[in-house]
Amino acid sequence: MSADERWTGGEMLAVAGSLQVHDGDVAVVGLGLPQMAALLAQRTHAPAARLLLEIGVFEPMPTEPSAGIADPRMWRGATAFGTTLEVLGVMAHGGRVSLGLLGALQVDQWGSFNTTEVETDGRRRRFRGSGGGNDISSNAGRIVIVMTHQARKFAETLTFLTSPGRQVGGRSRADLGLPGEGTCAVVTDRCVIALDDHGATLESVHPGEHPDAVLADTPIPLAVPDGGPKETPAPTAAQLAFIRNELDPNGWYTG
Amino acid sequence: MSTRPDRVVSLRELAAGIPDGSHVALAGFAITRNAVAFAHELIRAGTSGLSVTQVFSGMETDLLVAGGAVDRLTYASGSLDRFGLLHAVNRGVATGRLELIEYSGLALALRLHAGALGLPFVTTRSMLGSDLLAPLVAAGQVEQIESPFDGAPCLALPPLRPDFSVVHVDVADRAGNAVVDGPLWSIPETARASRVALLVAEEIVDVGELDPSRVTIPGSLVHAVAHVPRGGHPTAVYGRYDYDAAHLRSYVAAAGEGVEEHDAYLDRFVRGVSTFDEYLALAAA
């Protein structure tokens, strides 16, 4: 959803997600909305960001929309093809990945997340599983989650903890044996939630959103900064044009 | 004068060599480079009781599960990318008909790597702290240990040695030396880990025609290769053909509808034909 009719919720999400990518990041990118955010960052403020795909693709610069990580369109412009052992192993496990940009079905207040199964009306429904998501979140320098905002996607206890965040069951990453800081942001189509070792904070709400309404739909412990959350920068005309004309002209992900 | 082995067989012979109850590793990834022709042939052969390992499971595994060939699946994930989920797999897990053992992508690739090299075990820090860990520990498939060198927490995983692997390759020579173009995900580990490595090839050439520096899978590891042009349809094969979006959409729609609709798809496109060429003609109609 979007609280501002000048753009869709998906477009706002792609833009806000892209701002989490630093120029120079080495980023492993997941299927769908993470692809949108990463490619937008690459074409705007982070041209030196190097993207990796767990399928074994290094530094792609695709020029047309794709159906996912396994769509050869997503591999265009790559500098090298290799293996999963190279991307998830040598790059991520080897400590060479600064950012994981991933989607989630459900996230907790420490940024641990679920990509495996959800429970509705007492019935479990299976989705994709970990793939490389657990490896990326276990080994990258920091993690950013991008997902659409629904209250049921935030939970203090996850249906299935596929990927660890900043702590699990009161144990820090270091205590668990994991490097990196873990999840540093959860970006949705309504807000940006920042995470540190003290917990989650509602850092900004998107233009047109009211903080109280966002808080009501985010049922995890969530701090509010003194003076309230900021407003997320609105998408620029250039960002919107790139999304609509090149990145996702069919609106598969951002429509 | 030395001679080179000729490992070319028919697709039917390739599938007939897989006994019921075998452990078969498949190497497609979601909607790309799936050994669909091989999966069709196994279903037509009535093969059952398989244990399948596929790191990033896709169309081939979903077909085999729908066709009743699989009792157990070991994977890290399964999907058809944007086209949808693996409905037969997910339904099988929900009803308990399919036993699912799940890892992270790297952990499962590392188990295959250990199997390939004959290592006693392999280690990683992936999966620490996650809910993936407990069922694997309970099943005796993973043990949490401390590094003997610095005491760091880590996991020990045993080698994985499937009975068979099947990889859909671009070009193979008659001795089974094979070229895979594009990204390789867990294809090399999958082929190397199995006791018997089988190939389905888009093209077959004579020994000596391939540049050895381009060979992804050496024929020394390979037992047999079958020639099936477009054998990955409706999944994509890099540099050769795109995925068939319309076919994938209709497959997912049927699979998602329920068991009967999924079975009707198999009756029409798999059991209702006797060769993959007939299927391709039907799919193009």
Image (tube, grey):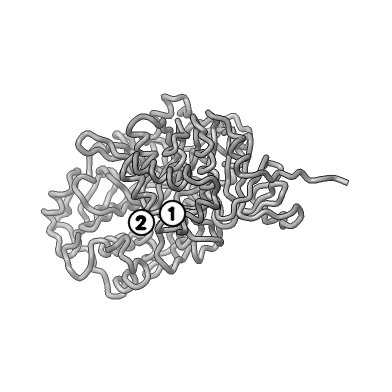
Which residue is rendered at x = 46% and y = 33% of the image?
A: B70
Q: Position of residue A38 (x, y in %)?
A: 38, 61
| Snapshot quadrant of residue B191 | top right
Residue A8: x, y in percent? Answer: 23, 65
Residue located farthest toward the right when viewing the structure as drawn? B1
- Tell me: A255 left or right of B231: left
* Identity of the residue drawn at 38% across and 43% down: B264
Q: Is residue A153 left or right of residue A214?
A: right
| Quadrant showing the C terminus of chain B | bottom left
Reading the image, the residue beneath label 1 is A28
Q: Residue at x 45, y 30 (%)?
A: B71
Question: Could one spot residue A121 in this view of the protein?
Answer: yes
Disc 2 residue crowd, few under 14, some 14–19, many 20+, Cα 10 Å: many
Say whether residue B153 is visible: no
Number of marks in the rendered image: 2
Foreground: disc 1 or disc 2: 2
The amino acid type, in three-letter code, at marker 2 is Gly
Mark linked to residue A32: 2
Which element is circle 1 on?
Answer: strand
Q: Is there one chain holding both mark 1 and mark 2? A: yes
Residue A44 appears at what percent x and percent y?
Answer: 37, 70
Q: Chain of mark 1?
A: A
Say what secondary structure mark 2 lies in.
Answer: loop
